[in-house]
Amino acid sequence: MSAQNPGFDAAEIDKLKQNIAQQKNKFVLVDTDDNNEEYKHFRFTGMYEGKEVIYDAVIYTLRLHHASEVYELAEHKAAQKFPNFKPIKFQEDENGDLRTLDDVEEEIGLYIAEMIDDIEDEELVKVQEHVDMDNGGEYGIGLDVGLNVEEVDEEVMNNFISDFNEDHLELDDTLYAFVSNEEEYDAE
């Protein structure tokens, strides 16, 4: 643990503890556009190797984790099939509308969608609850947490912190596969 990491600095830890004390939760959300019902970036304090530290954590649903892994595999398959493959980047035109994809991008996008369906149907990707720790980060100890919950809300986060800090965390080692909810994408 290097002295340059502010997540180990007593003053920084005290500042976070004061922020947490001013609210009803055991954490402070990190202000990011990535936060949503299935993903949260937050910080809390706890012990690491006998010392108080700041944990810089992300917690997400297994469904989101599965979708990400499936998409990554589908993209990999597309890269193998299309020699000039580049990940599709959706861009806005001058009016703020999404720019239409060119023919190659459209063909790649359709192929990726087809691969996602195949990967899900064949259950090629399975995920399980996990907590990955990174003690070489730039701010405190990084935690990457996947839980089998419908959404990541304050109760889920507070329960995780309590269980983690009290060393009572029990992870489900069942392997799960999910199927995309087609209705989410259909226009009403």
Image (spheres, rainbow, N blue to C red):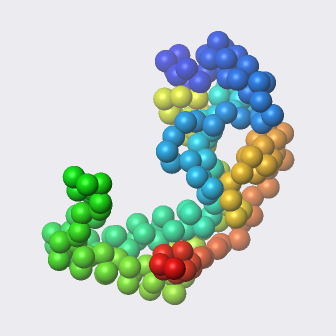
In the rendered image, which quarter contains the N terminus? top right
74 left or right, relative to 139? left
Q: Residue at x 74, y 46 (%)?
A: 154
Q: Is residue 26 visible?
A: yes
Q: Residue at x 71, y 35 (%)?
A: 27
- Residue at image location 57% in from the left, 73% down from the top: 126
Instruction: Judge whether 155 appears above or below 112 on screen.
Output: above
Image side of residue 88 versus residue 72, left or right:
left
Q: Is residue 3 above or below residue 62?
A: above
- Which sits in the foreground, 106 or 7? 106
Task: Name the spot of residue 9 as percent of width and height, x first.
Answer: 61, 16
Is 180 rendered above or below residue 97? below
Numbered circles on residues, count: 0
The residue at the far top in this view is: 11
Q: Which of the 4 quarters of the picture holds residue 112?
A: bottom left
Residue at 56% from the left image edge and 47% from the top image edge: 35
The picture places residue 39, in percent across and down from the top left corner, at: 59, 52
Quarter of the image holding residue 148?
A: bottom right
**Foreground pick, 80 / 98:** 98
Viewer-proximal residue among 4 and 41: 41
- Using the rendered image of the protein, determine whether residue 89 is visible from the camera's viewpoint: no
- Left or right, residue 106 beside residue 48: left
Whether residue 179 sits left or right of residue 54 in the image: it is: left
User: In the displayed structure, would residue 114 be above or below residue 19?
Assistant: below
Identify the residue at the far front of this view.
Answer: 95
Residue 11, horizontal then vertical, whole percent: 64, 12
